[in-house]
Image (tube, rainbow, N blue to C red):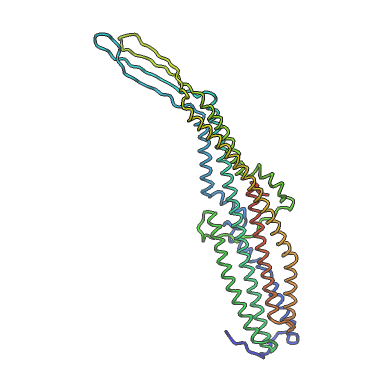
């Protein structure tokens, strides 16, 4: 570290008669410089136009298109639709070819051939009931696919909000680093002019290094956020992302009424829709099980070829199963009834859980939004005014270095607290939208 020289003359062109005013003006402009540069952001947007990550919509589109979970759910739904046709179809018929001999009391017994065909026919609307059970399964699979999509959307929304706030935290801490570096420069100039202490120079340089280490930590957090977002986009963890431009806007306060949201969730939450389909399937299956007390019939016909040793013959028959296994059918009925009751109980439990989660998420959302508004409207302007006052006072020697550094750190901390509150707001909003089954 170079040792600053006390008492150096002011360089040509400097306003020698007002050194305090020049220092105060330069320090104030340095400390209050806006976070980031518009020109660099424009260049970043131009270079990252084709990459996902600039907006939430860009990453959601990629996630929905490439998600293996959603692809698997779509295939499950297609399989369930195919089972509807299977459930409504008749069983395969039975064709039998039998060789037998002709009954004779004397002499050789020539051969005869019997060609038979029989078909089992379900009665008592069993085929319709089985089709209804399969259709309920289709509804359940489709609702579970929607639930998987809603959960994926929530994870992507939270990951994008973390990516945005991590990116902004690095940028704003870099602004703090530049500001502290400006303070250190002013401290060196004050010391060179004989108006400051060497201890102030060392203190400012230590603070500059400390902020630099914080930037390293925040950059690691940013890489972690990028990796999480890339994983949801089915991309390598270190794949490049476009710089995030903005968080999505928040809904109006009237849209966050917990009672209305609970009503919307009852009809829109995919998990509740899946439970309702499961109840319909279980109730229909119980009705189908009760029909097992009534037998199906099997009809058949046969043609007899006596190979010239007699006229051809024919057979026809009707068969049915006798329901003698009373214990089996009673157990089947009990099982179907228990399944229907369990499905209703799961629906009630899920409704209660959703109401509870909604109330918690809405309260958290309102708290985070109010916190962000308070920081944005009051704390930041107050902290910026304190920085301006401290910068002006330090330039004239009326305020010590510790006060200036503390004011600048407070301003940076408030900016980071605002980012944290905005992230919490986005996280709670994503949870609310998953619970109600759609965007607000």
Inspect this view and state whether residue 22 appears: no
Inspect this view and state whether residue 408 appears: yes
Q: Position of residue 137 (x, y in %)?
A: 55, 37
Residue depicted at 72% across the width and 78% down the height: 391
Q: Position of residue 58 (x, y in %)?
A: 60, 54
Would residue 24 appear left or right of 214 to someone viewing this image? right
Residue depicted at 58% across the width and 56% down the height: 52
Check the picture and name the quadrant holding the N terminus.
bottom right
Would residue 143 appear left or right of 250 to someone viewing this image? left
Residue depicted at 68% across the width and 56% down the height: 364
Image position of 384 with respect to 432: above or below = below
Q: Nearer the viewer, residue 112 or 43?
A: 112
Q: Position of residue 431 (x, y in %)?
A: 63, 52
- The quarter of the displayed image where residue 144 is located: top right
Q: Nearer the viewer, residue 40 or 379?
A: 379
Q: Nearer the viewer, residue 285 or 391?
A: 285
Q: Position of residue 105 (x, y in %)?
A: 27, 8
Residue depicted at 68% across the width and 67% down the height: 415
- The quarter of the displayed image where residue 108 is located: top left
Return the residue found at the far bottom: 7
Return the residue found at the far front: 327
């Amino acid at each position: 570290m170079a040792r600053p020289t006390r008492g150096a003359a002011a360089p040509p062109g400097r306003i020698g008669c007002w050194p305090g005013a020049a220092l105060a003006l330069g320090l104030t402009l340095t400390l209050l410089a806006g976070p980031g540069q518009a020109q660099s952001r424009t260049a970043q947007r131009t270079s990252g136009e084709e990459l996902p990550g600039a907006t939430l919509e860009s990453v959601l589109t990629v996630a929905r298109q490439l998600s293996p979970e959603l692809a698997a759910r779509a295939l499950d739904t297609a399989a369930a639709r195919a089972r509807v046709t299977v459930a409504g179809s008749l069983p395969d018929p039975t064709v039998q070819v039998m060789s037998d001999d002709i009954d004779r009391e004397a002499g050789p017994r020539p051969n005869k051939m019997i060609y038979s065909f029989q078909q089992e026919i379900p009665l008592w609307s069993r085929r319709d009931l089985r089709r209804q059970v399969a259709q309920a399964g289709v509804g359940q699979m489709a609702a579970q696919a929607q639930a998987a999509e809603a959960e994926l959307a929530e994870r992507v929304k939270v990951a994008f909000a973390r990516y945005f706030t991590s990116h902004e935290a690095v940028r704003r801490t870099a602004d703090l680093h530049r500001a502290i570096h400006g303070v250190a420069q002013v401290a060196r100039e004050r010391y060179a002019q004989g108006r400051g202490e060497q201890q102030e120079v060392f203190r400012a340089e230590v603070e500059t290094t400390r902020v630099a280490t914080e930037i390293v930590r925040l950059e690691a957090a940013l890489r972690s956020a990028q990796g999480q977002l890339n994983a949801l986009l089915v991309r390598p963890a270190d794949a490049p992302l476009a710089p995030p431009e903005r968080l999505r806007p928040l809904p109006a306060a009237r849209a966050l009424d917990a009672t209305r949201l609970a009503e919307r969730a009852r009809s829109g939450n995919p998990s509740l829709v899946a439970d309702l389909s499961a109840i319909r399937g279980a109730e229909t299956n119980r009705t189908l099980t009760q029909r097992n007390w009534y037998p199906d019939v099997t009809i058949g016909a046969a043609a007899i070829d006596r190979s010239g040793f007699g006229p051809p013959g024919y057979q026809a028959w009707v068969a049915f199963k006798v329901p003698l296994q009373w214990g089996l059918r009673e157990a089947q009925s009990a099982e179907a009834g228990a399944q229907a009751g369990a499905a209703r109980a799961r629906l009630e439990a899920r409704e209660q859980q959703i109401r509870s989660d909604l109330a918690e998420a809405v309260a958290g959302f309102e708290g985070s939004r109010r916190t962000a508004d308070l920081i944005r409207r009051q704390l930041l302007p107050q902290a910026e005014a304190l920085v301006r006052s401290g910068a002006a006072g330090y330039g004239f020697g009326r305020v010590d270095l510790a006060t200036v550094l503390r004011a600048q750190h407070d301003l940076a901390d408030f900016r980071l607290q605002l980012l944290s509150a905005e992230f919490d707001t986005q996280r709670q909003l994503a949870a609310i939208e998953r619970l109600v089954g759609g965007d607000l």
